[in-house]
Image (tube, rainbow, N blue to C red):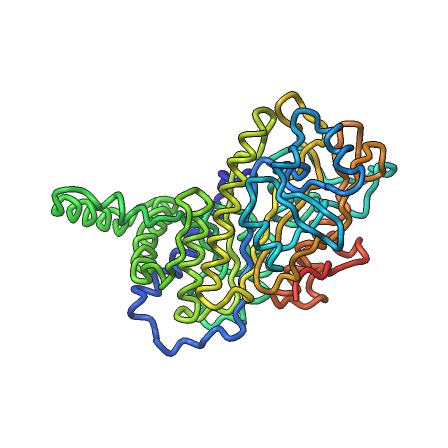
Amino acid sequence: MNQHSISRRNFLGMTAGFGALAALGNLSALTANAQTAGDYKALVCVFLFGGNDGHNTVVPLAGGEYTAYQSLRGGLALPPNQLLAINAGGTQYGLHYGLPELQTLYTQGRAAIVANVGNLVRPTTRADLSQVPNQLFSHSDQVAQVQSGAPDGSLGTGWGGRLADLMQTVNTNPDFPPSISFNGTAVFATGAQIQAASLQPGNLLSQYAMNVYPPEHGAARQQAQVEIVNNLSSFDLVNAANRVTGNAVNLNGILQSAGSGGITTQFPATTIGNQLKEVARVLSIRSTVGMRRQVFFCGLGGFDTHSGQSYAQWSLLQSLSQALGAFYAATQELGIADRVTTFTASDFGRTLQPNNSGTDHGWGSHQFVLGGAVQGGAIYGTFPSMTISAPHFMDSRGVLVPSVSLAQYGATLANWFGVADAQLDAVFPALQNFGVRNLGFLA
């Protein structure tokens, strides 16, 4: 299942989510006595579709490691003047030059790096590859598995949705979706019990569909739309689609009433910037709609860099860094920086050795976690050496065998979110195969 696919189950789930939003009506009509979110927490997943190249995202600079990296990377190696210096436990590393905002957050202790994370069934090395995830190098399979949290792809729900399932009783408003995707239908946000929503940023219905001249034409179009969506059909699927559209109009009203949410932080007008801006707007009404736990999903595509990687990755990482920097600033402005944790995930990493001007599909990669609760300015997990014959490389192309499993990474986030350790094995089926269940990057 890729990021654009949609099943009947997910479609109906999305309909249910919009239906719940319809019950809320206009934001100004919501109760002013909604319980405040003193115990509020939110997880924001930013998925890098296509498989981000971790080897050029975080580069070792100490000793002979940079020389080895430079030799193995060939023409894709970043020169020292294109690496943003960071320190981890006295060891020097460099971030890709497209990541200045993340460098600042890392230096301030508000961002951390989790090294060599990947989808694992159990601890694995080059010497024992007998049990690996299904279809390891397939984009669609790995997107589904990473978002579902199941290395065999057997679960029909996502680990973000399952976390929302477990925390649903904490929320005081059962009619507002605790799990929202701003990047189309996402397995990650789909739970077994909670009502999830799949939305697009920008209030497109109100801004474009009805914003025509002269004004009476827009009003006529809007009235026609209302009549269409309220017209019952003999086909259940048509009625479900009409409910989705009708309730999207109601959601537009909620978000329009919220306005900017009082946020003055300027977001970049990019795909990921617009998505995170919408997340910030929803965060701004958290108390009004009675939410204490929320899960969000955003995505940025284009990381399948088989060619032209030097420019393509720079452009993508620059967009990512600017958006994440703005989003963290917005959480500070809202006074909830320590209650919102944002993290990256991806299909897989890429090979250390290049393929002409690009790289091929890999496995392990480095991920970022940021927020006020992050024990930042540090690298968690084991950063791989640049020795191609080492056990942490799967082959001579430089496919990293992950040293940190997705289950450990997610379980650490889940613990902070409020999920008890005893419940984690049900969220991450592979977690029971790993001794360390919390990596310690969150307070």
Give percent across and percent down for residue 428. 69, 55
Q: Residue furthest bottom?
A: 33
Q: Residue at x 62, y 50 (%)?
A: 368
Q: Which of the 4 image quarters holds residue 33?
A: bottom left
Q: Residue at x 64, y 66 (%)?
A: 419
Q: Residue furthest front?
A: 81
Give percent across and percent down for residue 381. 75, 51
- Residue 129 falls left or right of residue 351: right
Which quarter of the rendered picture does the N terminus lie within? top right
Q: Residue furthest top?
A: 356
Give percent across and percent down for residue 48. 56, 42
Depth order, front residue of 4/183: 183
Q: Residue at x 74, y 36 (%)?
A: 66
- Residue 143 falls left or right of residue 278: right
Give percent across and percent down for residue 7. 50, 42
Q: Is residue 341 above or below residue 66?
A: below
Q: Which of the 4 image quarters holds residue 60?
A: top right
Depth order, front residue of 407/369: 369
Which quarter of the rendered picture does the C terminus lie within? bottom right
Q: Is residue 283 above or below residue 55?
A: below
Q: Residue at x 41, y 54 (%)?
A: 278
- Residue 273 falls left or right of residue 209: right
Numbered circles on residues, count: 0
**Is residue 157 in view from this perspective?**
no
Depth order, front residue of 138/52: 52
**Is residue 242 in view from this perspective?**
yes
